[in-house]
Amino acid sequence: MTEDDEWVQSEYCKIYVEMSQGAIKSIGEFEQVLNRKYFYKIHFFKINPSASEEDFIKWKKHQSIGDWESDIWIMSDDEFLFFWPWQAFMITEFMEMEDE
């Protein structure tokens, strides 16, 4: 980001700040279910059919060392959706439930 660039809060971040601690905790609990290596690769390529093996390795590395609750503050919507698709889905679901 250059001096001229202005930080723009992503839509996921805007929803996140409105979420209750219970809703955020449920995303963390869901992550525990997803923490299966075979699950990652199968679903990564279903979500990203044009991705390369290199993309998968980059994604997998970020999954192992990254933290979605930190990334949500600094990533664009597209980046967050790429690196944290299930968390993004759950945040979107939360928003839709709140709208009902």
Image (spheres, rainbow, N blue to C red):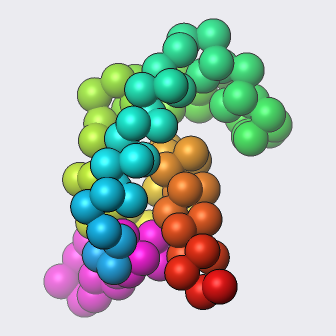
Question: Residue 6 colored magenta?
Answer: yes
Residue 38, image x, y percentages: 63, 10
Residue for point 74% across, 41% down: 47
- Vertical placement of residue 92 versus 4, above or below: above
Q: Is residue 48 magenta?
A: no
Total marks placed:
0
**Residue 65 sits above or below residue 99 on the image:** above
Residue 80 image position (x, y, % from top left): 47, 56
Judge by depth and name the residue closer to the eye, 54 or 35.
35
- Which residue sits furthest left? 3
Residue at 23%, 53% in the rendered image: 70
Whether residue 21 appears in this view of the structure is: yes
State the residue in front, 68 or 75: 68
Q: Name the image quarter holding the C terminus.
A: bottom right
Q: Report the residue that reaches farthest toward the top.
A: 38
Taking 63 as reference, is 98 above or below it?
A: below
Along the viewing direction, whichever of 100 and 92 lies nearer the viewer: 100
Image quadrant where residue 96 sits = bottom right
| Dominant secondary structure, magenta | loop
Q: Residue at x 35, y 71 (%)?
A: 19
Whether residue 74 is visible: no
Would you place residue 91 above or below residue 70 in this image? below
Quarter of the picture containing the N terminus is: bottom left
Give the left or right position of residue 21, taking residue 80 as reference: left
Image location (x, y in percent) of residue 99: 60, 86
Specify start and end residues of the magenta stretch as a single range: 1-16
The residue located at (72%, 35%) in the rendering is 51
